[in-house]
Image (cartoon, coloured by chain):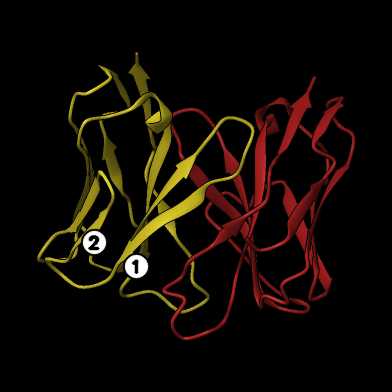
Amino acid sequence: DAGITQSPRHKVTETGTPVTLRCHQTENHRYMYWYRQDPGHGLRLIHYSYGVKDTDKGEVSDGYSVSRSKTEDFLLTLESATSSQTSVYFCATRDSGGSSYNEQFFGPGTRLTVL
Amino acid sequence: TQLLEQSPQFLSIQEGENLTVYCNSSSVFSSLQWYRQEPGEGPVLLVTVVTGGEVKKLKRLTFQFGDARKDSSLHITAAQTGDTGLYLCAGAWAGGTSYGKLTFGQGTILTVHP
């Protein structure tokens, strides 16, 4: 298993406050991803990174920003949290090896509640 | 946006029964994966299929990739209570850029009763 940790694991916050979720990996994987998981929607990509300081938007990026200053850390920030951002957030990593066939390794998730 | 339609969304069966979960798209995928997720944890990869028509077996689980690489199925034989969980299909779009982005289906919640 890739060593992927997420912090915090649970958070309750109020509408309008900024929130930062952290993903830390110990596998030196090049690619990192942030997803949100909601009932009936599977996993939806928020942002991804293909290297240090190289990031791009996914399909549900509005209201979120990311930063990656080191290979091992990928931060997701909710600039001004809204109730629609209540969700479970997963970080994933992927190696850049040619035989990986896009396999992603997932962290344990962060359950975020916005009141 | 490439969509993956997964069905059924819910499946409740008795131990010993067989079941099939389907994943369909109008897009061609270069590879397709099946993940299993347990409550409170992240998804874990079960299998990757990359060749049209490919069939892979993992104990009682059989995975098939459609000839045109637009669909896939997961068949479980003689389900056990330990198979209970959320099953997700995910595809890497053949016409996309690299970076390994995946499109996920909506998921199938499987409950196997003793």
The circle drawn on residue B27 is 2
The chain coloured yellow in the image:
B
Identity, as a three-letter code, of the amino acid under mark 2 = Ser
Residue A110 at x, y percent in the picture: 74, 39
Q: CA distance from mark 1 to mark 2?
A: 7 Å
Whether residue A77 is visible here, answered yes or no, is: no
- Give the class, few, some or many, for how many residues have Cα within 10 Å of label 1's Cα (few <14, many ≥20): many
State which quadrant residue B87 falls in.
Answer: top left
Q: Quadrant of the C terminus of chain B?
A: top left
From the viewer's side, name the closer residue of B12 and A87. Answer: B12
Residue A10 at x, y percent in the picture: 80, 32
The circle drawn on residue B93 is 1
The correct choice, above or below, for A12 with respect to B89 in the image is: above
Q: Does residue A105 appear left or right of residue B93 in this picture?
A: right
Residue A83 at x, y percent in the picture: 72, 25
The correct choice, above or below, for B3 with respect to A3 in the image is: above
Q: Does residue A22 appear left or right of residue B70 in this picture?
A: right
Q: Tell me which chain the residue with mark 1 is part of.
A: B
The chain coloured red in the image:
A
From the viewer's side, name the closer residue of A66 and B73. Answer: B73
Identity, as a three-letter code, of the amino acid under mark 1 = Trp
